[in-house]
Amino acid sequence: MKNKKDLIRVVRIEADASFEFTLDFTGKTPGRGAYVCPDTVCLERARKQKGLERSFKQSIPPKIYDRLRGELAEHGS
């Protein structure tokens, strides 16, 4: 268990007839959210254990995880 302020929110935003996923570093973006640690190891663990799939109750394509990893790396720089 970690403090919510120490985590990064992954947000699912409804766009047209599909969903878009993004990282929310402010915690204020509207949409359904799930929280992960702010490092790539935690994101990979969530991918392996299907944590985001359970939170959002839908399958998440690998390209979404790749994009989220890129956003996380970009924000960390």
Image: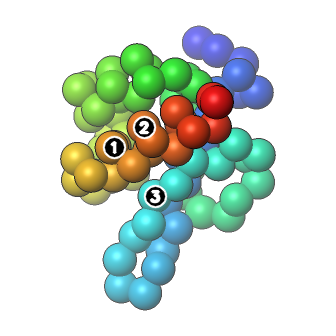
Q: Residues within 10 Å of mark 2 (few under 14, many from 20)?
A: some
- Going by the image, does 68 lie left or right of 33? left
Q: Is label 3 or label 2 in front?
A: 2
Query: What is the spatial separation of the Cα atoms under label 1 and label 2, in whole angstroms?
Result: 6 Å
Residue beneath disc 1: 65
Q: Is residue 14 visible?
A: yes
Residue at 43% in and 87% down: 16
Number of the label disc, if any, that sits on residue 69: 2
Q: Are marks 3 and 2 in contact (CB under 8 Å)?
A: no
Q: How far across and how far down the image is residue 36, in percent? A: 52, 30
Which percent across, then down, holds residue 72?
53, 36
Instruction: Give percent across and percent down for residue 53.
Output: 30, 44
For residue 21, the mark is 3
Mark 1 element type? helix
The alpha-carbon separation of the residues under discs 3 and 2 comes to 12 Å
Mark before the other along the chain sequence, 3 or 2:
3
Are discs 1 and 3 less than 8 Å apart at CB?
Answer: no
Q: In the image shown, does 14 or 61 lie closer to the viewer?
A: 61
- Identify the amino acid type marked 1: Tyr
